[in-house]
Amino acid sequence: MSDHLAPSSVPAPASVSAALTDAPIVAHVVRAGFVESVHHGTAVVTAPDGSVELEIGDSSGAVFPRSSSKPLQALAMVRSGLATDGRLLSLACASHSGEEFHIEAAREILAGAGLAETDLQNTPDYPYDDAARIGWIADGRPKQSIVQNCSGKHASMLATCVLNGWDLATYRDASHPLQVAITDTVRELTGAEPSAVAVDGCGAPIHAVPLRALALSFGRLAAATDGPEAKIATAIRDFPEYLGGTHRDVTALIRGVDGLVAKDGAEAVYAVGLSDGRGIAVKVADGSSRARSVVLAAVLRRIGVGSDEVLSVLEHQPVLGHGQPVGAVVAVGV
């Protein structure tokens, strides 16, 4: 029998975005003065009108923003009648750490809509925060949807469905009215037609858009002075610990720069909006999160945003030897 797959068994080649294929080296992994590995990536800064002010690589290439899309998804919910604000709205935009205050807030959203944890359809998991995860497992508790980092988004999706009389069992389907509203909002805020729709890690749809379009959408959110967009931005700025967590760099970044909104995403995506309407987006081509915040910090330094104190939090990615720092992940070419 041949060791080769029959032609009909070979999957068709997947399309590869220019944001990956044309990505230059943007970070070195340095161990004791020796460059051990490199990361390729793409970064862009957009002006309020959508023009490109700074580009590293080809930002016209599409990416899945992953959890960086959550503020846009939450915006669609608010436009559809979701009345939460403050910390609960920030949690709707969150990839939270699964700390106790996150879990209680997610339960509050569900209770306010007359729902239970069993209504959640996001993928069960342990808490993201190290200490919270260790404590959860030590207590013998299993993976649960309520502690998974997307539970605030899913609880808010369900609450939006209750308000509109939409079916709860199918809320993750791309054809569901909620997901159609989210697609329309993504299209409007990014100014781009999604080039692909897939299932995100939590089970909800995710849309591929050009990296520069993602940056533009965050600039629009951050510059908004009224309406649902401003409501989203205000919630994120006022309650960044609900967006991320006690020990998260995204929380420190939002706290440390006036008027800034940001959201980190899986597969090494980071999106930022500034109050003057500029947007920033970063994608590390290999999906490694260790380079994501380092490259973003380099972009922020280049455009003069953020203090050394704040940016040092983003740049803190030590390389360890026997448990001790012997090097670091450092940005290059930005």
Image: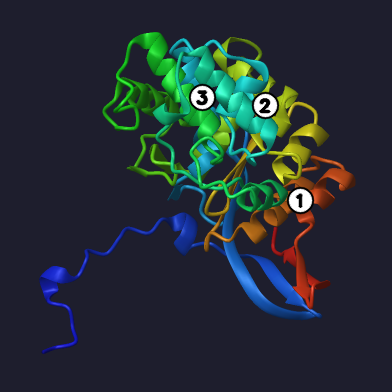
Q: Would residue 325 be seen by someone viewing this image from the given angle? A: yes
Front position in the image: 303 or 218: 218
Task: Determine whether the residue tagged by mark 1 lies in a helix, strand or loop.
Answer: helix
Locate residue 104, reporting x and y percent: 63, 27
Mark found first going from the N terminus, 3 or 2: 3
Image quarter hosting the C terminus: bottom right
Image quarter hosting the N terminus: bottom left
Q: How is the image coloured?
A: rainbow
Give the residue furthest to the bottom.
Answer: 1
Please indicate whether residue 287 sits to the left or right of residue 313 in the image. Answer: left
- Name which residue type carries label 2: Ile
The disc at residue 1 is none
**Disc 2 designates what residue?**
236
- Name which residue type carries label 3: Ala
Give the residue furthest to the front.
Answer: 140
Label 2 neighbourhood size at 10 Å, few (<14), some (14-19), many (20+)?
many
Task: Indicate whether 293 appears above or below 175.
Answer: below
Locate residue 230, reporting x and y percent: 63, 16
Q: Quadrant of residue 204?
A: top left
Locate residue 106, reporting x and y percent: 57, 27
Q: Quadrant of residue 251?
A: top right
Instruction: Name the residue rendered at 44%, 57% in the picture.
Output: 18
Please indicate whether residue 253 sits to the left or right of residue 38 in the image. Answer: right
Instruction: Name the residue rendered at 82%, 40% in the picture.
Output: 306
- Name which residue type carries label 1: Leu
Please indicate whether residue 211 sits to the left or right of residue 327 in the image. Answer: left
Q: Would residue 49 be seen by someone viewing this image from the given angle? A: no
Task: Determine whether the residue tagged by mark 3 lies in a helix, strand or loop.
Answer: helix
**Disc 1 designates what residue?**
314
Instruction: Name the residue rendered at 60%, 21% in the picture.
Output: 89
Mark 3 → mark 2, Cα distance in angstroms? 11 Å
